[in-house]
C-alpha cells in the first residue's frame, strides 16, 4: 500500500486514502491492521464512527481492487492476444519462407535436370562418335583382314595348282618308269650282278655299304647253291668268315665315316654343309637374314646354362621343337628374331630360355638398381596369354632367384605398382596396362635391354600399336640396338682409344675435385660413365634420355658432392648453374664454337679459377679455325699441333679442301 502527501489526520482527524488501481492481499491486511490501531487509540463514539467509516472505505477499496484486478487481467489477455497474433504472423512468415525455399529447390531441381539432360546428351553424342569410330575402325580391320584372307586364298589356290601340276608330272614320270621297268624286265629276267676285279671292288655313285651288303648276300647264296650241288656241309671257318663279312657290310670304314652316315649318327664337329641342309629340310626350318648360326640338334648342344637345362629336363622336354632349334641359338647371340611357327610348337620356351640366359649374365638385382626397372619385358595381346607366359617363365626359372611380375588388366593397379617398386627381373604385361603404369610413374624401363612381343601381328590387328610404341619410347635410346646391321657391326668393332687413358690420367691428377665431362651422344655418356664407375670413380650422368626427376637427382648429388664426376651431353651446357666446378673436359669436341663456349663456361664462375680440357681428333677439323682464333683472342696459348694444322689456317669454305695428311697428330690441351 502506498501513502501519498495528501494523507491527513487519522484517529480523530480527517483521514483520506488515495484510490489505488491495484492492491494485493498483503496491502489490504495492512490497512485493516492500521484501522484496528486507530480504533484502539481513539475511544468512545468517535471510535465507533471511525470504524464504520473505515469499513465503508474498506469495501470501496476492495471494489477498486477487484476492478484493478479485472483491468490487469484484461490487459494481460490483450497482451497474450497480441503475442499470439505475433506468433501467428511469424508462423505465416515461416510458411512463406518455406514456400520460397520449395520454389528455389524446384528451380534448382529443374536446372539440375536440364544440366544432367545436356550432359547425357553430350555423353551420348560422344559415345555415338566413339562407337562410330570403333565401328569404322572395325570395318577397316575387317576389310584389311578380308583382303589378307583373299590374298591368302589366292596364294593357296596358286600353290594348289602348282601342287596339282607337280603331282601330274610326278605321275607321268612314274608311268614312264613303269614302262621302262617293264621293258627291262622283258630283256633281263634275272640280271647278273657284276663283280669288279680291280680297285676297291666298288662302283662309283652307288652307296658303298649297300654294295657290300649285296656282295655278302650274293656270296652266301652262291656257296649255299654249291653245297646243295655237292652235298657238302658248311664248315665252322666258313661260317665265321661269312659272319665277319656281314658285320663289315653293316659297319662304316673310315672312308665312309664322312658321307655314308645320317646326320643323327654324327657328332657336331662331323656335320657337313650337306648334313645341315638335310637337317633343316627334315624339320622344315627356313631362315631369312645374314650371319645365321647353326640350329641346335638337341638340348645338350644348345649352350644353355645347367640351371635352365635342369628345368627343361624337369618339365619333360625330351627333344627341342623346330622353332626352338632355330630360335634359341639366335636368342643366345642376342640377335633380333621374328619367329613364325604353328600353335603349340613351343614358341614360349623359344624366347623365354634365351631371355633367362641373358639375364643370368647381368648383375644381380639389388636395392641399388631395382628402382631402375626390370631387365626384360614381355608383351602379349591378352591377359590370359600374359598369365600363361608368366607360368612358363616361372617354371623355367625355378632354379634361379628371379622375380617375375605380371601386369594385366582386371587387377588392382596399385598392387601391381607396389610389386614393381619392390623390384623384379622380368615383367610380363599387356601393352595398355604397362603404358598406364609407366605414365603413373609406377614403373621405369631405364635398364631394360630385352623386349619380347608375343603374337605381335595380333597386337597390331587389335590396335595396340600406339601402346607398344609408347612402351618402347619409354626406354632410353641407348638401350636400343641400331636398326641398320652395318651400324651394329661398326659398334661392335674394338678400337684402342688413346684419349680414354688421357681422361683417366687427368681424373687421377684432379683428386676429389669436381669435373664435368661433355660428350655428344647419350649412348656415349652412359658407356663412358659405366666405364668410369667400374674404375672406382663416383660418377653420374645427365642427358636427354633421362626423366626430369632423374636429372634433378643427378644434379642434386653432384652439387652435394656425392658424385665428383658428371658425364653430360649439351643438356648441361646451357643455363645450369653448378658452383665449384674445378674442371671441364670436352671428351667430344662440339660441332660449333658457340657450344664450346657454353661448355667451358661451366667452370671458373663467380671469380673462381677453373680448367678446361678438350680432346681433338681429325674429325673435328671444321672447328679448328674458330678454336684457334678464340684462343688467340682470349690470350690463351695455342698448341703447336693446332697452330700447324692446315684446317686452322683458313676458315672452312674459304679455300678448296685439301686431302688430310695421315701423319698429323692432334693432342689434348
Image (tube, rainbow, N blue to C red):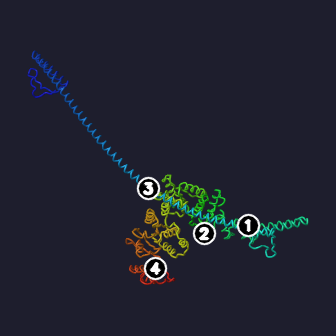
Mark 3 Cα-neighbour bin, 10 Å: few <14, some 14–19, many ≥20: few
Tell me the residue that label 1 is attached to. Answer: 178
Query: Can I make out residue 637 in this image?
Result: no
Of the image marks 1 and 2, the number of the one nearer the N terminus? 1
Residue 314, percent across and down?
Answer: 64, 56
274 vs 401, nearest the viewer: 274
For the residue pair 265 and 645, the one nearer the viewer reads as 265
Q: Nearer the viewer, residue 536 or 512?
A: 536
- Label 3 vs label 2, nearer the camera: 3
- In space, the residues marked 2 and 4 are separated at their CA atoms by 40 Å
The number of discs equals: 4
* Distance Cα–Cα, label 4 vs label 1: 80 Å
Question: Which mark is drawn over residue 621?
Answer: 4
Q: Are marks 1 and 2 in contact (CB under 8 Å)?
A: no
Q: Is residue 638 visible?
A: yes
Q: Which residue is mark 3?
A: 130
Q: Is residue 212 left or right of residue 530?
A: right
Mark 1 → mark 2, Cα distance in angstroms? 44 Å
Amino acid at each position: 500500500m502506498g501513502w501519498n502527501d495528501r494523507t491527513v489526520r487519522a484517529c480523530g482527524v480527517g483521514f483520506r486514502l488515495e484510490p489505488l488501481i491495484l492492491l494485493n492481499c498483503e496491502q489490504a491486511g495492512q490497512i485493516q491492521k492500521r484501522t484496528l490501531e486507530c480504533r484502539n487509540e481513539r475511544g468512545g463514539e468517535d471510535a465507533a464512527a471511525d470504524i464504520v467509516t473505515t469499513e465503508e472505505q474498506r469495501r470501496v477499496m476492495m471494489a477498486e481492487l477487484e476492478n484493478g484486478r479485472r483491468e490487469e487481467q484484461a490487459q494481460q489477455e490483450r497482451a497474450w492476444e497480441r503475442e499470439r497474433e505475433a506468433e501467428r504472423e511469424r508462423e505465416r512468415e515461416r510458411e512463406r519462407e518455406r514456400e520460397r525455399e520449395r520454389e528455389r529447390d524446384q528451380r534448382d531441381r529443374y536446372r539440375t535436370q536440364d544440366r544432367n539432360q545436356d550432359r547425357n546428351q553430350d555423353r551420348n553424342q560422344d559415345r555415338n562418335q566413339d562407337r562410330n569410330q570403333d565401328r569404322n575402325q572395325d570395318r577397316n580391320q575387317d576389310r584389311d583382314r578380308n583382303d589378307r584372307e583373299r590374298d591368302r586364298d589366292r596364294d593357296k589356290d596358286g600353290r594348289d595348282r602348282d601342287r596339282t601340276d607337280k603331282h601330274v608330272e610326278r605321275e607321268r614320270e612314274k608311268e614312264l618308269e613303269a614302262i621302262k621297268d617293264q621293258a627291262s624286265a622283258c630283256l633281263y629276267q634275272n640280271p647278273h650282278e657284276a663283280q669288279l676285279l680291280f680297285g676297291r671292288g666298288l662302283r662309283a655313285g652307288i652307296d658303298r655299304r649297300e654294295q657290300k651288303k649285296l656282295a655278302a648276300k650274293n656270296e652266301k647264296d652262291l656257296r649255299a647253291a654249291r653245297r646243295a650241288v655237292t652235298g657238302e656241309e658248311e664248315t665252322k671257318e666258313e661260317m665265321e668268315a661269312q659272319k665277319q663279312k656281314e658285320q663289315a657290310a653293316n659297319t662304316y670304314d673310315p672312308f665312309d665315316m664322312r658321307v655314308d652316315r645320317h646326320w643323327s649318327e654324327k657328332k657336331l664337329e662331323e656335320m657337313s654343309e650337306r648334313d645341315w641342309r638335310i637337317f633343316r629340310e627334315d624339320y622344315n626350318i627356313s631362315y631369312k637374314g645374314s650371319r645365321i648360326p647353326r640350329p641346335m640338334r638337341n638340348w645338350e648342344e644348345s649352350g644353355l646354362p645347367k640351371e635352365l637345362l635342369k628345368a627343361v629336363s624337369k618339365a619333360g622336354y625330351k627333344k627341342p621343337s623346330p622353332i626352338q632349334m632355330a630360335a634359341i641359338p639366335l636368342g643366345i647371340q642376342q640377335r633380333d628374331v621374328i619367329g613364325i611357327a604353328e600353335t603349340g610348337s613351343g614358341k614360349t620356351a623359344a624366347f623365354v630360355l634365351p631371355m633367362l640366359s641373358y639375364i643370368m649374365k647381368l648383375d644381380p638385382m639389388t636395392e641399388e638398381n631395382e628402382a631402375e626397372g626390370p631387365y626384360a619385358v614381355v608383351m602379349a595381346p591378352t591377359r590370359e596369354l600374359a598369365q600363361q607366359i608368366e607360368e612358363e617363365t616361372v617354371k623355367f626359372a625355378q632354379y634361379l632367384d628371379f622375380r617375375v611380375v605380371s601386369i594385366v588388366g582386371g587387377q588392382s593397379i596399385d598392387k601391381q605398382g607396389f610389386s614393381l617398386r619392390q623390384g623384379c627381373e622380368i615383367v610380363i604385361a599387356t601393352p595398355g596396362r604397362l603404358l598406364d603404369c609407366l605414365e603413373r610413374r609406377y614403373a621405369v624401363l631405364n635398364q631394360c635391354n630385352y623386349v619380347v612381343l608375343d603374337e605381335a601381328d595380333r597386337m597390331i590387328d587389335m590396335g595396340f600399336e600406339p601402346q607398344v610404341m609408347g612402351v618402347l619410347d619409354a626406354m632410353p635410346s641407348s638401350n636400343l640396338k641400331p636398326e641398320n646391321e652395318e651400324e651394329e657391326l661398326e659398334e661392335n668393332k674394338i678400337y684402342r682409344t688413346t684419349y680414354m687413358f688421357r681422361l683417366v690420367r687427368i681424373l687421377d691428377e684432379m683428386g676429389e675435385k669436381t669435373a664435368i665431362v661433355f660428350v655428344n651422344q647419350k649412348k656415349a655418356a652412359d658407356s663412358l660413365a659405366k666405364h668410369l664407375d667400374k674404375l672406382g670413380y663416383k660418377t653420374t650422368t645427365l642427358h636427354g634420355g633421362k626423366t626430369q626427376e632423374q636429372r634433378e637427382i643427378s644434379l642434386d648429388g653432384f652439387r652435394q658432392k656425392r658424385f665428383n664426376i658428371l658425364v653430360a651431353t649439351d643438356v648441361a651446357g646451357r643455363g645450369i648453374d653448378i658452383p665449384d666446378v674445378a674442371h671441364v673436359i670436352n671428351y667430344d669436341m662440339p660441332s660449333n664454337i658457340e657450344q664450346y663456349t657454353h661448355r667451358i663456361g661451366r667452370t671458373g664462375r663467380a671469380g673462381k679459377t677453373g680448367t678446361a680440357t678438350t680432346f681433338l681428333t681429325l674429325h673435328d677439323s671444321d672447328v679448328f679455325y674458330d678454336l684457334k682464333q678464340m684462343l688467340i683472342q682470349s690470350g690463351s696459348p695455342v698448341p703447336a699441333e693446332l697452330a700447324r694444322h692446315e684446317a686452322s689456317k683458313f676458315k672452312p669454305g674459304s679455300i678448296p679442301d685439301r686431302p688430310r695428311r695421315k701423319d698429323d697428330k692432334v693432342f689434348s690441351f
